[in-house]
Image (spheres, rainbow, N blue to C red):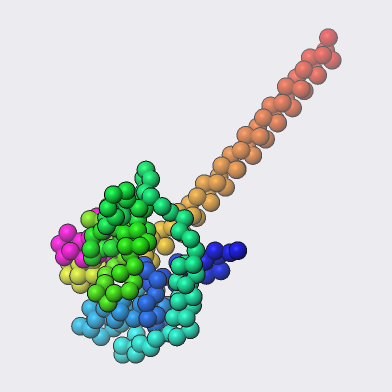
């Protein structure tokens, strides 16, 4: 039987701002989708400009678009959640190199998510309150990592969810409005996707060059072999 995620891509149903599965999904005019709370919070920081942009494609909208829950997308997300809950967990206890759950007592389970607000990592069981309780609604979840402090702005104590291309560093949204104001900034998720594509293109170019060098070497070996045969044949004919 196909596991959850075989037919539904979890990454495609994740919010580019909080990186978690969409909650109360809304689709803005450019076609990108976000959690309603995430895009509201992002646009609240842009009220002083009057231009409301998409964190991914940077298209701007004036006036501020009215957000309406994407019912169809919400149903798809719920089906994915149901499927994921039906799949038996493939992880148990944390092994070497795994991020451990900070809540587990005794033998630690493997963490599946880290919270940038709590600065803690959680296994599947201890992560549930972040999905179910309104208290954790605005918390930022990310892939489990053991270096949480590196993802928090040391000046504003906010998640580093923006990338400044001008200064080539990750910053928080308050940095983008302050010392990095006017710089070329994009969402950290968008920049990561762009760099992954660049890396893929570079790898393909390197692979092509390797194949070309292999062919040149083979041609050289073939030419040398032909020359040796010709010299041996000529030498034999002259005796």
Magenta highlight range: 150-163
- Which is nearer the eye, 211 or 69? 69
The one of 151 and 182 positioned closer to us in this rendering:
151
Above or below residue 198? Residue 81 is below
**Residue drawn 40% across the image and 71% down it:** 21
**Percent from the top left, x then y, of residue 40?**
29, 81
Can residue 185 be seen here? no
What is the x, y in percent for residue 141? 32, 65
Farthest residue to the left: give it: 155
Where 213 falls versus 108 (above or below)? above
State the image coordinates of residue 53 (x, y, percent, origin top left).
Answer: 33, 79
Quadrant of the image occupied by residue 126 = bottom left
Q: Name the quadrant of the N terminus.
A: bottom right
Q: Residue at x 27, y 53 (%)?
A: 105
* Quarter of the rendering containing residue 81: bottom left
Q: Which of 60 and 216 is in front in this view?
A: 60
Q: Which residue is drawn at 37% across and 61% down?
A: 124
Q: Is the magenta stretch mostly helix, strand or loop?
A: loop
Can the viewer see residue 234 in this picture? yes
Q: Does the magenta stretch include residue 162?
A: yes
Left or right placement of residue 99 versus residue 223 in this view: left
């Amino acid at each position: 039987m196909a596991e959850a995620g075989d037919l539904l891509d979890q990454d495609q149903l994740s919010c580019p701002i909080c990186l978690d599965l969409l909650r109360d999904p809304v689709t803005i005019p450019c076609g990108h989708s976000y959690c309603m709370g995430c895009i509201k919070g992002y646009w609240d920081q842009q009220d002083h400009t009057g231009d409301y942009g998409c964190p991914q494609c940077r298209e701007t909208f004036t006036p501020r678009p009215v957000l309406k829950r994407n019912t169809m997308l919400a149903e798809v997300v719920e089906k994915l959640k149901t499927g994921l809950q039906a799949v038996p967990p493939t992880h148990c206890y944390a092994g070497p190199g795994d991020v451990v759950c900070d809540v587990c007592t005794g033998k630690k389970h493997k963490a599946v998510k880290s919270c940038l607000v709590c600065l803690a990592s959680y296994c599947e069981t201890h992560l549930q309150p972040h999905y179910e309780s309104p208290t954790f609604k605005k918390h930022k979840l990310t892939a489990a990592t053991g270096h949480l402090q590196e993802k928090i702005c040391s000046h504003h104590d906010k998640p580093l969810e923006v990338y400044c291309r001008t200064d080539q560093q990750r910053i928080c949204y308050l940095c983008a409005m302050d010392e990095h104001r006017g710089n070329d900034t994009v969402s950290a998720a968008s920049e990561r996707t762009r760099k992954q594509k660049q890396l893929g293109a570079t790898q393909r170019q390197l692979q092509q060059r390797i194949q070309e060098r292999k062919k040149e070497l083979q041609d050289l070996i073939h030419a040398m072999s032909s020359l040796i045969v010709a010299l041996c044949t000529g030498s034999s004919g002259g005796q």
